[in-house]
Amino acid sequence: MEYPIIAICALLASCLTLYSGFGLGTLLLPVFALFFPVEIAVAATAFVHGANSLLKVAVIGRHADRELVVRFGIPAILAAFIGAFTLGYASHFSEIFRYSIGSRTAIITPIKLMMGMLMFIFALFELLPKLRGLRFERKYLSVGGILSGFFGGFSGHQGALRSAFLTKVNVSPQAFVGTNAIIGCMVDVARITSYIFLFFLGGKAQVLSQGQWPLVLVGSVSAFAGVLLGKQFLHKLTMHTIQAITGMMLMGISILLLSGLL
């Protein structure tokens, strides 16, 4: 059952988020969290997101604005390492509380609380009109890179903040999409490298078990298909619809995480 769920979600998420520059990790992380522990779900999502980013760079990366890539991307990479190591540190904390609902045992841990609160905040940025329209000026690009990179490394939520900063800059739609793709790929490489190092440092032979890799492969292939499909049809979908879908899913999963039910 997990294979079709991940395949469909990866296909739709990749298709919906090609031009927005964010949402693939946001939509995939809750799906992987249904089958993996939260910290493993972040790593699995990173592999799919990284493979998807490489394809987007190949398809649209030539349109990127090099100045934006440098001014935003370099701080984002450095912050992504910090965010990833913060995730690795937080994942070793023991549970805080557990309770039962019928036959189901809910377990609340620090990592679930942090992830849940982050998702809740990002959901508000997608659902509330005032926050959805928030934009930043060019002089804050480095700050935006640091924030986007840190949350990209910690929870995988890098694209929403990155897009909020980059949409304020006077660039063409093609440059916006290409710049988003290259910076996202840079952050993915940084955080995937960190996740692998952290898991080896923690005494685990590999980031994902042998039985989990096929799910990542299915997600990656479906995300590839979503990029190609989205390139043809995404112009028919409004940004408001994308943000509403992302926000509602974030809100639901954040509640499940905060309650310990996920």
Image (cartoon, helix red, strand yellow):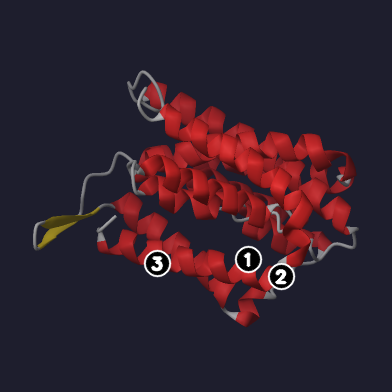
Which of the two marks, 3 or 2, is nearer to us in this view? 2
Residue 36, by quadrant, is top left
Total marks shown come to 3
**Vertical arrangement, residue 135 with respect to residue 210, above or below:** below
* Amino acid type of the residue tagged 2 in the rendering: Thr
Q: Position of residue 205 (x, y in %)?
A: 36, 18
Q: Position of residue 136 (x, y in %)?
A: 75, 67
The residue identified by callout 3 is 252
Can you tell which mark lies on residue 238? 2
Q: Secondary structure at mark 1?
A: helix
Q: Which circle's residue, 3 or 2, is located before the other in the chain? A: 2
Could you say which is closer to the camera, residue 234 or residue 163?
234
Q: Residues within 10 Å of mark 1 (few under 14, many from 20)?
A: some
Q: Residues within 10 Å of mark 2 (few under 14, many from 20)?
A: few
* Amino acid type of the residue tagged 1 in the rendering: Ile
* Amino acid type of the residue tagged 3 in the rendering: Gly
Residue at 52 percent of width and 73 percent of height: 124
Could you say which is closer to the camera, residue 50 or residue 221?
221
Q: Is residue 78 visible?
A: no
Query: Mark 1 to mark 3: distance in Å?
Result: 16 Å
Q: Residues within 10 Å of mark 3 (few under 14, many from 20)?
A: some
Q: Position of residue 79 (x, y in %)?
A: 61, 43
Query: Marks 2 and 1: CB-CB under 8 Å?
Result: yes
